C-alpha cells in the first residue's frame, strides 16, 4: 500500500513564465498532502521571495536565532515571526526554540509539506530519478513514478530542460536488483551499530544443497559500486574485515548486540573496497605489477590499458605498466594485445608468460 505525498516546487517567478503555477484567483498554489493550499502573494514580490529565503535558511541548519534570521533577511524580528506563521499555515513544522536568544527550527514532520528546490536542484533531482535504474537498488518503478510526479509540477521552463535530457541508464550487472527492504534493513543495522545475522547465498552453490549456518558481521558501511551493493564489516568469527554482496544476503531478525565501531584499514572505505577487488589486503594497488614493451603505437594501447600507465617510446613502440591480482592473470591480460611483447620485468611476469605459453600449446594440441 502506497502513501501519497505531493511535492511543491517553490521557484521564484521570472519573466515569461508567470502563469505556470498561478491560479485563477491570482494566488500562487502549493501542493501539500492530499489537498491544495494557496500561498498568498502580497502586493510586492518581496514577501514571496523572503518566504523562499526563510525556508531555504531553515533547511540549511538545525537552529536559527530569531535575531540572526532577521539580520540575514534584512527585516525586523516581528516580520520574521509573521513569515514563520505563514510557513506554518502552509504545513511546514517550524517550532519555536527556547533559550537566551530564542529562535526557530524546521522539524521533521509526520507529513510531507511542499519542498523547496531551486532550479538546479530540480534538474538534478530529475537526472537522479532517470538514472536510478543503474543503482541496483530495485527502485526503478518507484523512481519512474516519482519522475512523473516531479515533472507534472515543474514550471514550463524547467520541464523543457528536463525533457531535453536524453539519458539511457542501464544496469552494470545482470544480477537481480537488491530488494529495497533488504537495503533498509542493512542500512539500519549500520546506523544502529548492531551486529547482523544473515543467510548468505554463495555463488555456484546448488539450490538443493544443505543449508549453511547463518553468518554474522558487524556492519560498518553499506557501499554502492558499479551497480552492486556491498556490506563492509568486521567478521568476529574470523577476526578480519569481510565484504558481502547485499543481493546475496537474507537478514535474520532480530539483530545481534551493539558493537564498538572500528576504522577500516587505511581509513577510506572506497579505497579499501577497491583494494579488496584488486586482491590486495592493504593499499589500493594491484598485488602483481609488471612492465612490458608492445610493438604498437600508444594511441592503440591507451584505450585498452585500464588503470595502467602508457608511455610512448617511438611512434610504433609503447611501454605499458599494468597490474592484476595474479601474475597469470596479468600475462593473459597483456596477451590480448595482438602484437609482439617484450617483458621488462619482473621475473615473475616472465615466468607467467612461459607457463601461459605451455598451456596454450597444450590447448592447441602441439605439446
Image (tube, grey):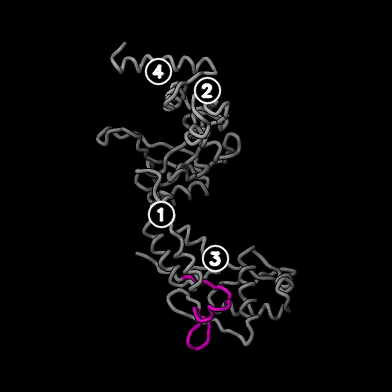
Work out whether 269 lies above or below 57. above
Q: Can you name the residue that lies furthest to the left here?
A: 208
Q: Main secondary structure of the magenta part?
A: loop
Q: CA distance from mark 3 to mark 2?
A: 61 Å
Q: Which residue is mark 1?
A: 168
Which residue occupies the foreground of this view, 306 or 29?
306
Q: Residue 77: x percent and y percent?
A: 72, 77
Q: Residue 194: x percent and y percent?
A: 50, 45
Q: CA distance from mark 3 to mark 1?
A: 35 Å
Q: CA distance from mark 4 to mark 3?
A: 62 Å
Question: Which residue appears at 63% of the width and 82% of the height?
Answer: 45
Question: Which residue appears at 50% of the width and 38% of the height?
Answer: 233
Would residue 11 be counted in the magenta stretch? Answer: yes
Q: Which residue is mark 3?
A: 108
Q: CA distance from mark 1 to mark 2?
A: 39 Å
**Quick one: quadrant of the N terminus?**
bottom left
Q: Are marks 4 and 3 in contact (CB under 8 Å)?
A: no
Q: Quick one: label 1 or label 4, which is nearer the N terminus? A: 1
Question: SS class of the residue under badge 4?
Answer: helix
Q: Which residue is mark 4?
A: 356
Residue 293, disc: 2
Mark 3 or 2: in front is: 2
Question: SS class of the residue under badge 2?
Answer: strand
Q: Quick one: label 4 or label 3, which is nearer the N terminus? A: 3
Q: How many marks?
A: 4
Is disc 2 surrounded by few (<14), some (14 to 19) or many (20+) residues within 10 Å? some
Question: SS class of the residue under badge 3?
Answer: loop
Q: Is residue 102 visible?
A: no
Is disc 3 surrounded by few (<14), some (14 to 19) or many (20+) residues within 10 Å? few
Q: Residue 79: x percent and y percent?
A: 69, 80
Amino acid at each position: 500500500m502506497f502513501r501519497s505525498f505531493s511535492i511543491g516546487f517553490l521557484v521564484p517567478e521570472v519573466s515569461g513564465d508567470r502563469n505556470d503555477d498561478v491560479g485563477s484567483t491570482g494566488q500562487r498554489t502549493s501542493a501539500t498532502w492530499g489537498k491544495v493550499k494557496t500561498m498568498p502573494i502580497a502586493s510586492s514580490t518581496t514577501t514571496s521571495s523572503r518566504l523562499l529565503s526563510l525556508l531555504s535558511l531553515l533547511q540549511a541548519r538545525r537552529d536559527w536565532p530569531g535575531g540572526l534570521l532577521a539580520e540575514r533577511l534584512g527585516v525586523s524580528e516581528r516580520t520574521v515571526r509573521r513569515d514563520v506563521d505563514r510557513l506554518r499555515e502552509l504545513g511546514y513544522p517550524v517550532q519555536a526554540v527556547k533559550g537566551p536568544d530564542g529562535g526557530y527550527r524546521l522539524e521533521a514532520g509526520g507529513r510531507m509539506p511542499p519542498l523547496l528546490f531551486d532550479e538546479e536542484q530540480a534538474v538534478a533531482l530529475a537526472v537522479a530519478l532517470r538514472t536510478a535504474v543503474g543503482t541496483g537498488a530495485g527502485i526503478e518503478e518507484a523512481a519512474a513514478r516519482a519522475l512523473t510526479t516531479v515533472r507534472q509540477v515543474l514550471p514550463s521552463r524547467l520541464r523543457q530542460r528536463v525533457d531535453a535530457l536524453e539519458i539511457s541508464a542501464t544496469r552494470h550487472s545482470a544480477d537481480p536488483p537488491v530488494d529495497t527492504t533488504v537495503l533498509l534493513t542493512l542500512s539500519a543495522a549500520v546506523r544502529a551499530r548492531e551486529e547482523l545475522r544473515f543467510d548468505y547465498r554463495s555463488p555456484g552453490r546448488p539450490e538443493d544443497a544443505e543449508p549453511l549456518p547463518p553468518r554474522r558481521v558487524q556492519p560498518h558501511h553499506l557501499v554502492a559500486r558499479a551497480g552492486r551493493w556491498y556490506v563492509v564489516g568486521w567478521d568476529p568469527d574470523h577476526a578480519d574485515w569481510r565484504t558481502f554482496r547485499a543481493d546475496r544476503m537474507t537478514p535474520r531478525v532480530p539483530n545481534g548486540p551493539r558493537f564498538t565501531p572500528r576504522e577500516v584499514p587505511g581509513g577510506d572505505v572506497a579505497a579499501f573496497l577497491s583494494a579488496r577487488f584488486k586482491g590486495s589486503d592493504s593499499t589500493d594497488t594491484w598485488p602483481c605489477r609488471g612492465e612490458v614493451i608492445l610493438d604498437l603505437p600508444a594511441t592503440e594501447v591507451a584505450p585498452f590499458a585500464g588503470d595502467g600507465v602508457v608511455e610512448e617510446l617511438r611512434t610504433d613502440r609503447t611501454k605499458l605498466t599494468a597490474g592484476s591480482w595474479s601474475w597469470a592473470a596479468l600475462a593473459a591480460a597483456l596477451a590480448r594485445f595482438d602484437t609482439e611483447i617484450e617483458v621488462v620485468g619482473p621475473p615473475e611476469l616472465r615466468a607467467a608468460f612461459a607457463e601461459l605459453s605451455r598451456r596454450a600449446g597444450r590447448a592447441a594440441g602441439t605439446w
